[in-house]
């Protein structure tokens, strides 16, 4: 099975459609969406509807912190991340908001665990940005010996961690389009990056495909019309910062 892994779409319809098409061309059999369908971007309704259709076709979908925020937007905005929550909520129907609210925090598929943030406390949305955090996330599943692969969103970067014969973790920065062997005698954690808001200086969208038969993980970067996505943000009257970010990849 080729499992396409997408996360942090952030209401960026142009990036989502480009990644879906790319994954289908790569032979993806199934999709998994690791949260943050909404927030920042200008097309929350269309994105939620796309993901609902994917779920109806068998996709696994979990909740991110921005999805949770739509259910209860903060009365006072104290961070950049909170600044579009009320606007996003106002765009969505009751049914769409319920869809986001009822999404689970984690899902399992065979020996794979999907989680938006760190698995040691999913509701706190901890970032997995280094070996220590990756180790804590993997340790949270220590009693579930069958779990060998953990796929994580939230950080908007593509990184692979693995645990070999000892207890320490190794960190690996993948090259886009190059398959990485991920044998199941090790434990693996991958942050798959952001479809809709990359932050590494490259505006190309991010996603990955796990081939469970060949035991290979391939990270991808996908070009899309990020100027159009940025323009949609500006036309919606959302903070220009989010549009600028799409054009610079930061």
Image: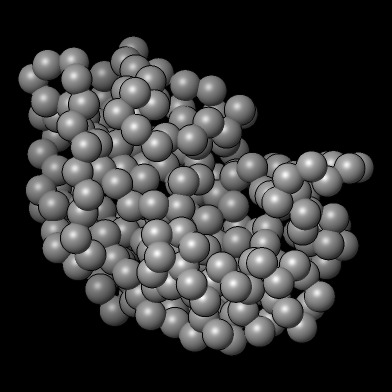
Q: Quadrant of residue 103?
A: top right
Image coordinates for residue 234, horizontal then vertical, percent? 73, 79
Q: Picture coordinates of residue 162 (x, y %)?
A: 20, 33
Q: How is the image coloured?
A: one colour
Residue 240 lies, with reference to residue 159, above or below; the image says below
Residue 160, image quadrant: top left
State the count of labels. 0
Between 49 and 165, the residue placed more toward the observer is 165
- Depth check: give the residue in front, 11 or 241: 241
Which residue in the rendered view is the most extreme toward the top? 143
Residue 12 position in % (x across, y down): 59, 71
Residue under the point 52% across and 66% down? 196
Q: Residue at x 70, y 51 (%)?
A: 80
Q: Position of residue 199 (x, y in %)?
A: 46, 59
Residue 205 visible from this viewpoint? no
Q: Is residue 189 visible?
A: yes
Task: State whether residue 38 is above or below residue 13.
Answer: above
Horizontal relation, residue 238 to residue 214: left or right: right
Left or right? Give the position of 12 relative to 168. right
208 left or right, relative to 57 = left
Locate the N terminus and report the quarter of the image it occupies: bottom left
Q: Nearer the viewer, residue 19 or 54?
A: 19
In the image, residue 186 sits, relative to residue 205, either above or below, namely above
- 204 up-or-down from 159: above or below: below
Q: Residue sitting at 52 percent across and 76 percent down?
A: 247
Residue found 77% across the figure and 70% down from its top: 238
109 vs 85, left or right, is: left
Q: Residue furthest right?
A: 75
């Amino acid at each position: 099975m080729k499992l396409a892994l997408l996360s942090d779409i952030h209401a960026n319809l142009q990036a989502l459609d480009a990644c879906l098409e790319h994954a289908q061309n790569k032979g993806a059999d199934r999709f998994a969406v690791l949260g943050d369908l909404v927030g920042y971007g200008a097309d929350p309704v269309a994105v939620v509807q796309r993901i609902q259709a994917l779920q109806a076709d068998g996709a696994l979908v979990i909740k991110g912190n921005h999805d949770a925020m739509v259910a209860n937007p903060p009365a006072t905005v104290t961070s950049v991340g909170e600044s579009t929550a009320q606007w996003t909520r106002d765009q969505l129907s009751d049914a769409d908001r319920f869809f986001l609210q009822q999404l689970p925090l984690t899902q399992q598929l065979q020996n794979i665990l999907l989680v938006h943030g760190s698995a040691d406390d999913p509701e706190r949305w901890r970032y997995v940005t280094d070996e220590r955090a990756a180790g804590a996330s993997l340790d949270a599943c220590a009693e579930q010996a069958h779990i060998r692969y953990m796929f994580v969103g939230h950080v908007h970067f593509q990184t692979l961690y693995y645990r070999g014969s000892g207890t320490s973790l190794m960190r690996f920065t993948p090259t886009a389009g190059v398959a990485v062997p991920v044998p199941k005698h090790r434990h693996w954690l991958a942050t798959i990056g952001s479809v809709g808001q990359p932050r590494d200086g490259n505006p190309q969208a991010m996603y990955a495909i796990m081939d469970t038969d060949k035991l290979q993980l391939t990270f991808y970067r996908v070009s899309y019309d990020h100027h159009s996505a940025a323009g949609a943000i500006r036309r919606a009257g959302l903070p220009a910062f989010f549009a600028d970010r799409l054009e610079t990849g930061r």
